[in-house]
Image (tube, rainbow, N blue to C red):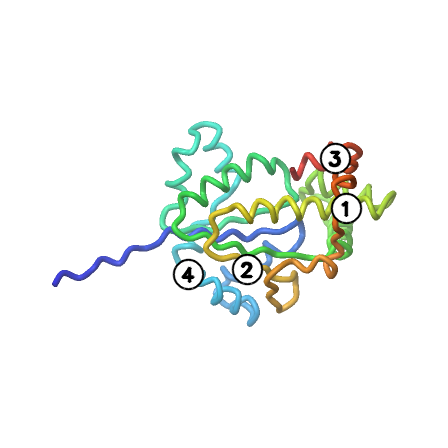
Amino acid sequence: MAKKSKRNKRRLVIIAGPSCSGKSWLIKQIRSGTPSKFVGLVQKKCKIKGTVLSNRLRLSALRKDWRKYGDRKIKKRLRRGAYLHFDITGRQQKLKRTILRKLMNSADQVIVLNIVMSFEQWIEVNALRMEQEPECSVSAFVKGMLKLNEKNPLAARRCYTYAFDRWQQYLEFSPLFKCITMESRQPTFIDQIESDRLGLVKLTRVQLAWLQIRFGLLLFKVA
């Protein structure tokens, strides 16, 4: 009897979260070959292996391909496996999520490592980064949120909640194989985002409508 050929699945690993949540740190740890115990557990739970780690997808290149060729090159970029660093508070969310959808549809398995962090920690880390590393590229949303938090912390908290809600809604309708949510910089996995602990607030329809009117230009960046 002929031996069955082993087919390598096209696995897409998306490491996603807000700016400064620890995405780059996690990627470097996994790629180092000697990750910490916690990162080793993440890697084992997600079954992240060689072909995936050898192919890092960059959104800048994918955007160029998308504008020039449409979705023809998306599948080729994915090859037999790849991983993607995805900032949910970065620029051009609508375009990036459109491209991400194409990648997801071309993959056999899609794993999302969803990194979460509290609102207070997010503000603190981003403010520190802007102060200590002014040469780093910081998104317009982050800059706007830091200014808003100085004037109106509750409004900033609601805008942060809005960004998370948009991402969660996107994931709910995505073709996922597995979604693991981990709390930033803490060795724990959580099944769902714990809104209270993250300082997120429940937005009523009236509050949401008011946010979209009052802070429309800011929220447009993560819509």
Q: Position of residue 209 (x, y in %)?
A: 75, 36
> Does dot 4 land on a helix, a strand or a loop?
loop
Q: Residue furthest front?
A: 205
Q: Choose the circle earlier in sequence order: 3 or 2.
A: 2
Q: To which residue does mark 4 refer?
A: 49
Amino acid type shown at disc 3 = Gln
Which quadrant, please, contains the C terminus? top right
Q: Earlier in the sequence, mark 1 or mark 3?
A: 1
The vertical placement of 24 against 88, above or below, is: below
* Image spot of residue 67 (x, y percent): 49, 28
Label 4 close to label 1 by CB (< 8 Å): no
Q: Which residue is mark 3?
A: 212
Dot 1 surroundings within 10 Å: few (below 14), some, or many (20 or more)? many
> Residue 180 — which label?
2
The picture places residue 113, in percent across and down from the top left corner, at: 55, 56
Q: Amino acid at mark 1?
A: Arg
* Front: mark 4 or 1: 1
Toward the viewer: 145 or 139?
Answer: 145
Q: Residue at x 51, y 48 (%)?
A: 84
Q: Earlier in the sequence, mark 4 or mark 3?
A: 4
Q: Is residue 153 above or below residue 113?
A: above
Residue at the image position 57 percent from the left and 44 percent from the top = 170
Q: Which residue is mark 1?
A: 158
Q: Residue furthest left?
A: 1
Real-space CA distance between mark 4 and mark 3, rounded to the nearest whole angstrom: 42 Å
Q: How far apart are the two marked residues, 4 and 1, measured between alpha carbons?
A: 38 Å
Is there CB contact under 8 Å for labels 2 and 1? no
Q: Nearer the viewer, residue 155 or 47?
A: 155
Q: Earlier in the sequence, mark 2 or mark 4?
A: 4
Name the amino acid, label 4.
Lys
